[in-house]
């Protein structure tokens, strides 16, 4: 079964680890070989600039990851850079679609030209924050009652104009509700349900319903502390509980996957890298029909982005 995965941190690792290679580096959880083994047909590659990097070096760090996307990922003949959603329908057997996302606007400061520069590299999803406060908004580690900052208006306007998916996965609660009426295209690329695991990185039932009511979707994340309260290890079955819970709230057609491979220090048993996706699919098939799992794995997101193209025409 083909899979679309909305989040991995391969680019950060490719720029940090010495002599890393995307094809088969054993240090990567979402290397090209592992994506192939797991039938991942489309992978989103996040530009993730760690908060430890000094502010004045963050934009350069983002540029380095974009460079790694070209020189280490796209240089592999199987990889196709998806810059227009219609390209998803054109992927041939053996090809894997590669999408760029920006995980948090920390690297742009309050400079809209920097954001334009990053979008021009072919970025299709943008999150306003990672876990901390930046020039745009407050992340999930911050006070949940603080909303979007004035600069967010300009940022969201540009993202809407460019038909970018605005990612709420690391945004705090008030920022989320401030953003809903402003964003044209909204998504949670890697978040779970707070109804099952009460963690600030997860979405409440109300948030999930409102996200979908505003045309958005939620892609579940494979990080154990976001799956089972306080756990560094958990089972695939526990992750399936999140899918079942979200399905009971909004239906399966709005659910997808966003593993976070290469961005995690812990992993789910038997779901430790992209090659093990089949184990997750098998577990889902115990609770859902083949067609339903197909929708969650691929078809739902594909249909979602087709609508964005139609709205633009
Ligand atoms: Zn993340």
Image: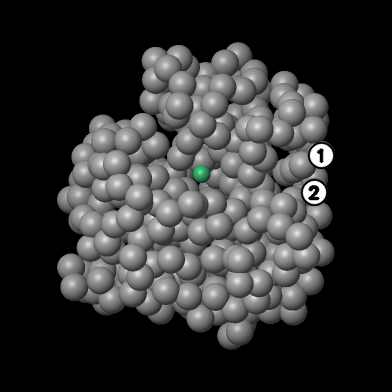
Q: Which residue is mark 2?
A: 64
Residue located at (52% from left, 22% from top)? 138
**Residue shown at the point (25%, 52%) measured from the top left:** 242
Q: Could you classify mark 2 by the number of other residues whose Cα lies within 10 Å: few (under 14), some (14-19), or many (20 or more)?
A: some
Q: Tell me if I can see residue 280 in this picture.
A: yes
Question: Residue 166 location, x and y as percent?
Answer: 54, 39
Answer with left or right where residue 4 lies relative to residue 229: right
Q: Quadrant of residue 97?
A: bottom right
Badge 1 residue CB within 8 Å of ligand 1: no
Residue 310 is at least partly visible in this image: no
CA distance separating discs 1 and 2? 6 Å
In the rendered view, would you say 169 is above or below 306? above
The crowding category of the residue bearing disc 1, from other C-alpha atoms within 10 Å (few below 14, some 14 to 19, many at least 20), is few
| Front position in the image: 273 or 218 | 273
Q: Quadrant of the N terminus?
A: bottom left
Residue 22: where, in percent of width, then height? 69, 69
Residue 292 picture quarter: bottom left
Q: Is residue 151 left or right of residue 76?
A: left
What x and y, as percent, mark residue 281?
Answer: 32, 73
Q: The residue tagged with tag 1: helix, strand or loop? A: helix
User: Which secondary structure, mark 2?
Assistant: helix
Callout 1–callout 2 Cβ contact below 8 Å = yes
**Residue 295 versus residue 202 in the image, above or below:** below
In the picture provided, is 155 more to the left or to the right than 7?
right
């Amino acid at each position: 079964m083909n899979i679309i995965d909305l989040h991995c941190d391969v680019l950060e690792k490719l720029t940090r680890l010495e002599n890393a290679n995307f094809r088969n580096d054993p240090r990567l959880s979402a290397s090209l070989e592992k994506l192939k083994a797991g039938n991942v047909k489309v992978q989103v590659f996040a530009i993730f600039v760690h908060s430890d990097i000094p502010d004045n070096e963050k934009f350069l760090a983002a540029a380095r990851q974009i460079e790694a996307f070209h020189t280490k990922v796209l240089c592999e003949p199987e990889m196709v850079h998806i810059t227009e959603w219609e390209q998803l329908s054109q992927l041939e057997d053996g090809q894997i679609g590669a999408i760029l996302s920006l995980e948090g606007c920390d690297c742009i400061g309050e400079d809209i030209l920097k954001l334009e520069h990053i979008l021009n590299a072919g970025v299709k999803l943008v999150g306003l924050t990672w876990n901390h406060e930046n020039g745009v908004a407050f992340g999930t580690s911050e006070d949940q009652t603080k909303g979007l900052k004035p600069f967010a208006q300009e940022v969201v306007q540009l993202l809407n104009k460019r038909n970018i998916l605005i990612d709420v996965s690391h945004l705090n609660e008030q920022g989320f509700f401030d953003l809903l009426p402003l964003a044209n295209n909204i998504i949670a690329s890697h978040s779970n349900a707070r109804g099952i695991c009460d963690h600030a990185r997860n979405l409440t039932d109300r948030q999930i319903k409102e996200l979908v009511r505003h045309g958005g979707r939620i892609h579940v994340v494979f990080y154990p502390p976001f799956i089972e309260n306080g756990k560094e290890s958990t089972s695939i079955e526990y992750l399936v509980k999140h899918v079942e819970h979200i399905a009971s709230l909004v239906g399966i057609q709005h659910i997808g996957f966003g593993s976070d491979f290469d961005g995690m220090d812990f992993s789910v048993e038997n779901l430790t890298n992209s090659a093990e996706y089949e184990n997750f699919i098998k577990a889902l098939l115990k609770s859902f029909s083949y067609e339903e799992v197909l929708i969650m794995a691929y078809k739902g997101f594909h249909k979602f982005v087709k609508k964005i193209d139609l709205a633009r025409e």
